[in-house]
Image (cartoon, grey):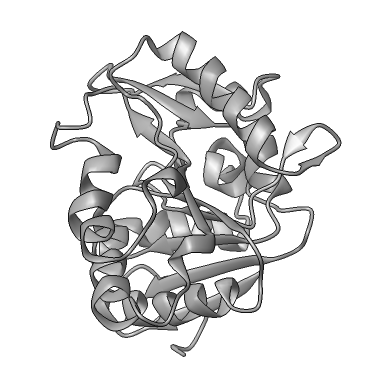
Amino acid sequence: MNLKIYKDKQKVAEQFSSYFVDQVKDKGTFHVALSGGSTPKIVFDVLAENFSDKVDWNKVHFYWGDERCVPPSDDESNYKMTVEHLFSKIELPKENIHRILGEKDPKGEALRYANLLEINLDRVEGVPQFDLVILGMGDDGHTASIFPHEIELWDAEDHCVVATHPDSGQKRVSINGKVINTAKEVAFLVTGASKSEKVKAVVEKTEGSEAYPASLVNPASGNLVWFLDEEAAAELNQNPS
């Protein structure tokens, strides 16, 4: 596990963007699963503004680790947020965007998306392998859309699962833990003081931390990077980068 701690959200976004560009460089086709949330929004802004001409976007294929079951025009859509903050500002072939169809029946869409991943990605022991999976973490320790109350979805047979938000009841389509842990590289983007307690629990594996899905992220490749701001890392015994 590689911990990178920066002053604030903006610095995290800048450093992550540099890291992303380095990941894509010197590679052929690059398959990445995106995350929603406030931190990726800033990352996408920085990528579009500072790095749009430093990446060969023709070889980058975008997917999502999870998506809310809403139409692509809905403000809750992770896809819509990515279009507004990144895709609309870069030269990207439409066929490189592989969105989860949030407007479709969740069960059918989870099956379709799992099948798409199997077709588009190389597989390791039958599990689709991303070059990079970007994850966030909720205040409750959830990641992708695997929540503590449905932690059994982590080990589901299907590559994509239908999850239910514990408070709103909203359905979401999410990749499962096997897909996350099969990725060549996994990067957490976590910022804000409200995350500090769970960051400590997950990173330091404190007692009871296994109840949080984020604690199950352990890629077989060994390539796990945390990008944190000082607020999120406040309870860790670490110095900022």
Q: Number of numbered discs present? A: 0
**Position of residue 167 measured from the top left corner of the image (x, y, whole percent):** 25, 23
Q: Residue at x 55, y 80 (%)?
A: 22
Q: Residue at x 39, y 36 (%)?
A: 99
Q: Residue at x 44, y 21 (%)?
A: 163
- Along the line of sight, which residue is nearer the eye, 32 or 138? 32
Horizontal side, residue 157 vs residue 137: left or right: right
Visible residue check, residue 71? yes
In this picture, is 31 found above or below 149? below
**Position of residue 1 measured from the top left corner of the image (x, y, whole percent):** 66, 69
Q: Residue at x 43, y 75 (%)?
A: 16
Visible residue check, residue 230? no
Q: Quadrant of residue 206?
A: bottom right
**Position of residue 15 measured from the top left corner of the image (x, y, whole percent):** 41, 82
Horizontal side, residue 93 vs residue 204: left or right: left
What residue occupies the far right of the structure in this picture?
125
**Position of residue 80 measured from the top left corner of the image (x, y, whole percent):** 22, 42
- Along the line of sight, which residue is nearer the eye, 107 or 176? 107
In this picture, is 150 found above or below 32? above
In this picture, is 9 found above or below 60? below
